[in-house]
Image (cartoon, rainbow, N blue to C red):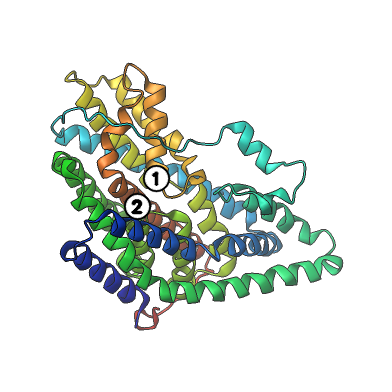
Amino acid sequence: MKTWIKYAAGIIIGILLGIYLPFDTEKMQGVLQYLSSLVINMGMFAVYPLVFFSFGYSIFKMRQEKILLRVILKSFLAIAASGIILVIFGTLTVLFFSPERIPIIIQSRTVESFPNYRDILGNLFPQNIFTIFSSNRNFLIPLTFLSFVIGLNFSFDKVMTRPAYQLFNAMSRIFYHIGIFITEVIGLGFIILSATMVLEIRNTPEIELFKQLLAILSLNSILVIFGILPLIFYFISGKQNPYKILYAMTAPLLSAFITGNSYLTLLSLTRSGKENMGIPRKIGASVFPLFTLFGKAGTAMVSATAFVFILNSYSSLGLTFGTVIWIMLFSLGTSFFTGTVPGVGVIVALAYICQHYGKGIEEGYLLIFPVSTLLISFSVLLDTAVAGYSAYLFSFRDKGHKEIEIKDYI
């Protein structure tokens, strides 16, 4: 059975359970929340070591073939370009449809915050490098940076460093195969995650207030995934069929929406990239982590859309041109840091934007907490689609991809 069918079946079963089974007791809700966190942890079991060993291997291979700089530059150009396109599209769409204002909902919540630049630099250059492996911080940047440095230094003496390179190569393959097992069985966990999501929606009486916002995000996501990205891909790739690639990404897209976690989705995206899209390991092992950490075009679009919605709810005055530009720039800039807070990126981004906008809406992000899970799901879904299309384009343009028939997709 194909992986995406397992995922879809798990999601459908979970939705039905969430609708029809009585999970109204506090004890049952607690059990579901615990099981959901367990599924997320299981899904991320192999992610950190896979990225560490595969990224270093990838850097060395691409440097040997003299394509390292080109792939890295293309990745960051694609990250910037996709972010600009989607944040403009999202902002203009919400301004055009102008959803109705909703009453201010008084809530008291706390959210994570982005690590400040001192924390980020401190983790990149710790006094004791081994603290990178023992830190409980939930982001991949220090690990990826260390892997990058090690990968660069495999080539200074190929005879002496060959055992270390072979170790990275072997460990990369080992954790990839562990990842295969996880991606095969995680569909069962999606029953829990989708049931929990449905239960959360059922227990949110304010959900009716956000119908227009959710309708806009749903429409935008459909247009981006089935229209804008395929159109861009079609012309850049020399009129390749974009929907074949979209079908190849079905499993990671389902994973992205139901988990809302870009790190967990990285496992499925890596596997689909290799076994469905034919992306070589040296490309996928570097491009996918870079997009997971910094490629947040979808997060930028959802952040801009939600912030305009928040502003309109706080004030009946229209937005000035300068304010609109500020929203787009700040949403785009903030999105680059959301890779440090997987699972809650768009909410932390909105909290940061509200606090810096000021003018009495420093806690305006609390307004959209009732639909925070869905906002996160939309943002990770779009981020994953951009990453998949971009990685395939890089390998296709470099003539490094392997053409795989649809019937052979996992």
Residue 393 appears anywhere in the view: no
Q: Which mark is residue 184?
A: none
Locate residue 1, reporting x and y percent. Answer: 34, 83
Name the residue that disc number 1 marks: 297
Task: Give the amino acid at mark 1.
Answer: Ala
Q: Nearer the viewer, residue 398 or 298?
A: 298
Side (left or right) of 248 relative to 8: right
Q: Up-down: is 179 above or below 144?
A: below
- How far apart are labels 1 and 2 at the CA level? 7 Å
Name the residue that disc number 2 marks: 382
Q: Up-down: is 287 above or below 159?
A: above
Locate residue 340, reporting x and y percent. Answer: 52, 44
Q: Using the rendered view, name the quadrant where residue 198 is placed.
A: bottom left
Residue at image point 42% right, 78% down: 404
Task: Give the amino acid at mark 2.
Answer: Leu
Side (left or right) of 178 relative to 209: right
Q: Earlier in the sequence, mark 1 or mark 2?
A: 1
Locate residue 352, reporting x and y percent. Answer: 42, 30
Contact between marks 1 and 2 (CB within 8 A): the answer is: yes
Q: Nearer the viewer, residue 149 or 141?
A: 141
Residue 285 appears anywhere in the view: yes
Q: Residues within 10 Å of mark 2 (few under 14, many from 20)?
A: many
**Element class at badge 2:** helix
Locate residue 107, reporting x and y percent. Answer: 28, 31
